[in-house]
Amino acid sequence: MFDLLNLPGIKPVDLSTDSKGITIIAEVDGAEIPKCEECQVQMHRHGRRTGTFADTPMQMQPVRLKITRPRYRCGSCGKMATPELTFLDERRRATARLVEAIRGRCLGMTFHALAEQTGLAVNSIKNIAFDLIGELEDTVHYETPVIMGIDEVNLAGGYRCVITNLATNNIFEMLEHRTQDHLKPFFKNLRDRERVEWVCTDMWRPFKCSFGPYLPNAKLVIDKFHVVKMASEALESERKRYQAELDKEERVRVKKSIRWLTLKRPSSLSPAEQEALTVIRSQLPSLAEAYDIKEAFYQIYDAEDKDKDKDEAIQLFAQWEASLPKKDFPEFRKLAKTVHNHYDDIFAYWDSPSQITNAYTESLNGVIKMANRLGRGYSYEIIRAKTLYAKYARTVGSGILVNPTTKVSETVEYGPHIPTLVDLADDGELD
């Protein structure tokens, strides 16, 4: 029979197919009778044993190898032995080449998809993945960011902490929890922690309390999107308060039309929406006023004027706060109080390089959640590994660094490239 396997030490003798895939019958080819390792005497044949092992797919079908091996017994001590086949992974009941193929794909595909392709059990694939993850934990280290982003994502039953490199738009780390008890040891033991110059995050104080004592050169910037989001939320509160006074039919109309209209920026309004906004101004003046207050706050951050400096931004905020009505719109007054509570960290945005934001970290969170949906039931550890170590995005973030001490070029990695992950997800290629 033609050798379909190209595996040393065995020869195929038969082949069959069924609904589960292709089965190839093989026998050990030309095995020598060994000596007993204990007694150093020649052993003798003592029957045969057949084992089934998964192999790499053929013709898009799973392949099983049924390999029959002779058994040998020592006449002196009774010890049994069978010929060793180096291409087998006995623990996984699979060929080594299949295990290697699974290692190369398990962080880029769902385990169930791999199980269907290979015929191997889902749990076996999961175990191979965990072995790989353990090796990657020990060998893969990403360059500590100069500009670090910190955010959270609700994933696999809890809030996780996602850390990114905002200078290169790469993932740096994902931590199981976002509590200080979990974050402080991470920052305390962070390699090259003195490299971090800027940290961009939201207003959740445990983040600042966690990294503050351990990143000596880092300055905090409150992410602008979290700040302006509060202005939109304040407008939403005003709309809901107005909506509660309407009858059911009018509430449906307001929710379907006015909500999305008032959340848009003026530059994004179509001609029809601009006309609708004019109607709102005449019929719902309080809601229109809230819309204008929201827009005035957004203008603090608007980037049309590339030369806007910190002093101008501070002045615009002061003007906005002074324009607030004394009694109405309590949510906007609450926003003004929040800005004062985080004043230095919010206006540090205009001191930071290229006015850094966490926008790419936010988009990454969407990709992580998509991976979670595709692989329902994945543990946090698996989702973290799929996010941090997937090869299809890691290669984009690699580079060459010349060590200033040794003058030797070293390959460095900055983690998976977030825009690449987003593009793959948009194209439906993120399995």
Image (cartoon, rainbow, N blue to C red):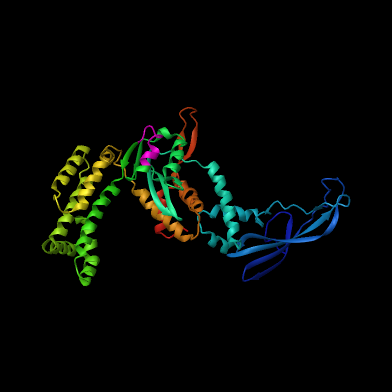
Count of numbered tags: 0
In the displayed structure image, the side of residue 104 where residue 78 appears, left or right: right
- Residue 403 in percent (x, y) is at 47, 31
In the displayed structure image, the side of residue 221 where residue 281 appears, left or right: left
Report the residue that reaches farthest toward the front. Answer: 327
Q: Which image quadrant: the N terminus?
A: bottom right
Quarter where residue 146 is shown = top left
Report the residue that reaches farthest toward the top. Answer: 405
Tell me the residue at 17%/40% (across/down): 315
The foreground one among 297 and 238 is 238
Q: From where the camera sits, is residue 424 visible?
A: no
The foreground one among 321 and 114 is 321
Quarter where residue 169 is shown = top left
- Residue 257 in percent (x, y) is at 22, 66
Quarter where residue 343 is shown = top left
Tell me the residue at 48%/29% (across/down): 407
Q: From where the camera sits, is residue 130 visible?
A: yes
Tell me the residue at 21%/61% (across/down): 241
The foreground one among 96 and 327 is 327
Report the residue that reaches farthest toward the right. Answer: 76
Segment colored magenta:
207-218
Is residue 266 on the magenta stretch?
no
In the displayed structure image, the side of residue 89 where residue 183 appears, left or right: left
- Residue 224 in percent (x, y) is at 28, 46
- Residue 259 in percent (x, y) is at 23, 62
